[in-house]
Amino acid sequence: RKEVEQDPGPFNVPEGATVAFNCTYSNSASQSFFWYRQDCRKEPKLLMSVYSSGNEDGRFTAQLNRASQYISLLIRDSKLSDSATYLCVVNTEISGYSTLTFGKGTMLLVSP
Amino acid sequence: NAGVTQTPKFRVLKTGQSMTLLCAQDMNHEYMYWYRQDPGMGLRLIHYSVGEGTTAKGEVPDGYNVSRLKKQNFLLGLESAAPSQTSVYFCASSSYEQYFGPGTRLTVT
């Protein structure tokens, strides 16, 4: 089983739509979770951390379900500028040190 | 602040040539990382460092070496480049969340 799994998409949605991405992770000991955004030919940038109680940042809402090892990202009122690849990221312990494991990403295309 | 910078931005190498990619960060982060990103493969960790003078292997370390002589710099070396090392290389640093450099696009012919 892959450590972090995401639907690669693409998700094609019109402006104004609500879209949700899901992610599952295999390491039940993982403690930290993030969503990153990556534009074409650019570096990944942190979108938001994901907290156990769920958290919201403007149009973006992240949820964590530890029992199911499942993370979600909800984008409301999609904008053209939201078009990007969204990476689900989970911390992993390697030799006692924490590193991040990245999903392969879900591509979002928002059209006029 | 510049954040995380990488040099060079682009490079073309011939098989067997060597090169060093430089990563610099000005955020006083202890942790630094080198990743490669290939189509359909996502980001894969090559090597990482948890502090000045330390390095450790990640998921795909073969064919690469690294050094962290100064806290702000993390160097990635390719001693004998192979076409399989054609990729986009990202450096990152962190205290908690990771911040990435703009990437180096390397082509090995």
Image (cartoon, coloured by chain):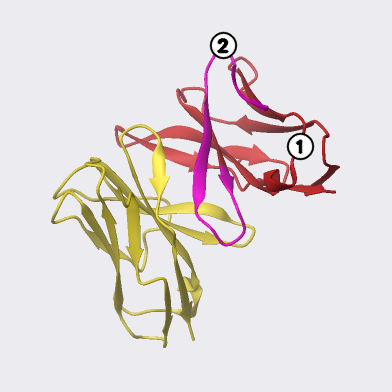
Chain colours: A red, B yellow
Q: Is residue B26 shown to the viewer in this render?
A: yes
**Label 1 secondary element:** loop
Q: Is residue A40 left or right of residue B10?
A: right
Q: Which residue is mark 1?
A: A78
Q: Is residue A107 shown to the viewer in this render?
A: no
Please give the name of the residue rendered at 48% of the width and 41% of the height, measured from the top-left corner. Answer: A101
Tell me the chain of label 2.
Answer: A
Counting from the top left corner in percent of width and height, residue A74 is at 71, 28
Amino acid at pointer 1: Ser
Please give the name of the residue rendered at 47% of the width and 25% of the height, measured from the top-left corner. Answer: A30
- Relative to A76, does residue B90 appear above or below in the rendering? below
Please give the name of the residue rendered at 80% of the width and 31% of the height, measured from the top-left corner. Answer: A18
Q: From which residue to which does the magenta span run?
A: A37-60
- Relative to B19, does residue B101 appear above or below in the rendering? above
Q: Nearer the viewer, residue B37 or A55?
A: A55
**Magenta segment includes A46:** yes
Q: Is residue A82 left or right of residue A41?
A: right
**Numbered label tally:** 2
- Relative to A55, does residue B23 appear above or below in the rendering? below
Please give the name of the residue rendered at 34% of the width and 50% of the height, measured from the top-left corner. Answer: B33
Counting from the top left corner in percent of width and height, residue B88 is at 49, 65
Q: Which residue is mark 2?
A: A53
